[in-house]
């Protein structure tokens, strides 16, 4: 008799543990460089770096945040002068979000730190292993999407 999905529960637990460990490692690394920013802030800044002027709705989807929590996060980023929200002329309720020049400078400051962290992880774990794990996770994702 099996334990009814214990292997998948262990797999899921490891995914959660990796996520937490990554966030903690990222936070420690940035703190060592005198940078105080939350993981959630980094998610938004990263999205904006890739696509300036995206809507808050798209940011919420890409960062897996509710509209309410994203709105609070946007307020914080605006107070720090890192982002600017502009209402669309067609629908004033829709807001487009942009990095400010200060936000762009901030992103350029942390980008080399993030690149170094990712490179160190890739070196320590190995690219082939990371690619295999990524492929396996994509397979699990696709299976779960079918259910």
Image: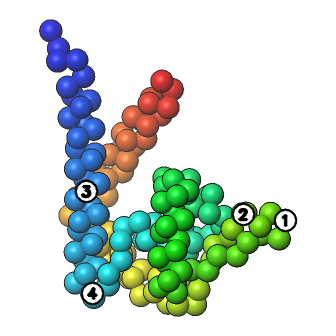
Q: Looking at the picture, how far across and down is residue 113, in whole percent? A: 34, 80
The earlier-in-sequence mark between 4 and 2 is: 4
> Residue visible at 42% across and 71% down?
42
Helix, strand or loop at disc 4? loop
Residue at 22%, 17% in the rendered image: 4
Q: Nearer the viewer, residue 30 or 114?
A: 30
For the N terminus, the quadrant is top left
Locate residue 84, reporting x and y percent: 61, 80
Asked whether disc 2 touches disc 3, contact meaning CB atoms under 8 Å apart, the reply is no
Element assignment for label 3: helix
How far apart in space, not on screen, are marks 4 and 2 (Cα)? Answer: 36 Å
Q: Residues within 10 Å of mark 2 (few under 14, many from 20)?
A: some
Q: Which residue is mark 2?
A: 94
Disc 1 or 4, which lies upstream in sequence?
Answer: 4
Near mark 1 (Cα within 10 A), the count class, few <14, some 14-19 or many ≥20, is few
From where the camera sits, is residue 44 visible? no
Q: Which mark is residue 74?
A: none
Q: Are marks 2 and 1 in contact (CB under 8 Å)?
A: yes
Q: Quadrant of residue 85?
A: bottom right
- Along the line of sight, the residue nearer the viewer: 14 or 125: 14
Left or right: where 84 falls relative to 134: right
Residue 90, label in figure: 1
């Amino acid at each position: 008799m099996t334990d009814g999905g214990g292997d998948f529960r262990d797999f899921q637990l490891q995914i959660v543990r990796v996520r937490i460990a990554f966030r903690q490692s990222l936070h420690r690394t940035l703190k060592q460089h005198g940078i105080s920013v939350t993981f959630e802030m980094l998610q938004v800044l990263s999205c904006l770096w890739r696509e300036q002027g995206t809507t808050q709705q798209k940011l919420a989807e890409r960062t897996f945040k509710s509209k309410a929590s994203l709105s609070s996060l946007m307020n914080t980023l605006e107070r720090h002068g890192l982002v600017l929200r502009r209402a669309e002329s067609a629908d004033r309720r829709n807001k487009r979000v942009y990095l400010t020049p200060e936000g762009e400078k901030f992103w350029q400051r942390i980008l080399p730190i993030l690149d170094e962290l990712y490179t160190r992880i890739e070196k320590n774990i190995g690219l082939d292993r990371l690619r295999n794990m990524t492929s396996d996770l994509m397979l699990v994702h696709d299976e779960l999407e079918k259910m």
